[in-house]
Amino acid sequence: MSSTLYDTLRRRVDDGTVPGAVALVARGDDVEVVAVGSADAGGSVPMSRESIFRIASITKPVTAAAVLMLVDEGRVALDDPIPEWLPELAEPRVMRTPAGPVEDVVPATRPITVEDLLSSRPGWGFPSDFSLPAVQSLFQVQKDGRSLQSWPGPDTWLARLAEVPMLRQPGEAWLYGTASDLQGLLIARVTGRTLPEFLAERIFEPLGMKDTAFEVPAAKRDRFTWAYNPSESGDLELADTPDGEFGSIPRFTSGGGGLVSTADDWLAFARMLLSGGGDLLSPASVSRMTGNHLTAEQRESAALFLEGQGWGYGGQVDMVPRDPWNVPGRYGWVGGTGTTAHLIPATDTVTILLTQVAMRNPTPTPLMREFWRACARTGS
């Protein structure tokens, strides 16, 4: 066991930052897992390698991979307009200027495409400035992804989104969040299956991701972690229990952040990508998924989220060695519930950190950065 990795987690458990954490670092076939602390703040349930977490936005790469499977099969094309399957979004209105009043809109100059969704440039989503009027309108539809039981069904959600003006024209700007949920709805409309059914049959079962799903059945809840929000005082506020939000599949299954999973399950997904797609994806699709699609201007305007790095399909792509862990080509993302997962093709490495304490904002937490630094220090 790497003392550096263990000490990094142990320190944050001891100071009360998190009740517990699971870290996994795989270098080729060599896999190291460290589980520290407990699944609950009371310390009654020890954390383990098999603990199940709400993984939030590290759901996004999984959903993007599912869309690319449909591309590989010829069921959709990257340049296909999405209104063929999501007709509710056929005539979106776009803000004349991003900071203007929501009534000052113009028509979209072209339809939104599948590639716009994959690269997170559909026109809807969150920019670095949350105060913009159109963003405030989007918040009414794109609610907290950690409380999905309160969301309406997909058809109602799409109708409500269509009433919100797009912040930017399709393809113009990287905007966070909405694109991945639209990917999930696209998958369901194209296949005629629910998103949980498609992901289970086409990704989770083939890869042996036995604990990844949109709900946690009663038989597995003894392994399911509690969820917490950090308060201003530094205390942890209970956000969800093992018998709470994930006791049943919600009406809206979020392709952007609705999954629960384990460290080993996400490792299986990452290894599929590192292998060039295995039996699930073509090497060309993996290359597109893990390569940058943003211009320098788009990267800069998304600095709050991307910190100057790029974006592939469903995840960030490191381009600049800003910090010791930023290896060019490193692909992955962070989750608002306190999770992060990356793969580094150049070194055949996977790094995964799962905690049950939510992020305060889009900026990665100190623990995440400490984990990444520990991985870089130990040779990943």
Image (tube, rainbow, N blue to C red):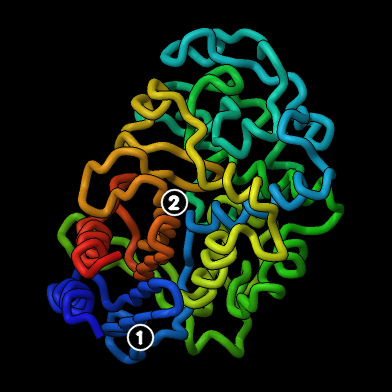
**Lower sequence index among marks 1 and 2:** 1
Dot 1 alpha-carbon crowd within 10 angstroms: few under 14, some 14 to 19, many 20 or more: many
Asked whether residue 335 appears in the rendered view, the answer is no
Front-lying residue, 243 or 261 = 261
Side (left or right) of 61 relative to 189: left
Secondary element at image label 2: strand
Q: Are marks 1 and 2 in contact (CB under 8 Å)?
A: no
At horizontal 55% and vertical 8% (from top left) the residue drawn is: 104
Q: How far from the left and from the top, in percent, is residue 92?
A: 68, 20
At horizontal 69% and vertical 53% (from top left) the residue drawn is: 282
* Residue labelled with disc 2: 331
Side (left or right) of 62 relative to 30: right
Task: Identify residue type, mark 2.
Answer: Tyr
Front-lying residue, 309 or 361 = 309
Residue 18, numbered label: none
Q: How far from the left and from the top, in percent, is residue 257?
A: 53, 55
Viewer-side label of 1, 2: 2
Secondary element at image label 1: loop
Dot 2 alpha-carbon crowd within 10 angstroms: few under 14, some 14 to 19, many 20 or more: many
Q: Is residue 181 above or below residue 338?
A: above
At horizontal 35% and vertical 81% (from top left) the residue drawn is: 33
Quadrant placement of the N terminus: bottom left
Residue 47, numbered label: 1
Task: Identify residue type, mark 1.
Answer: Met
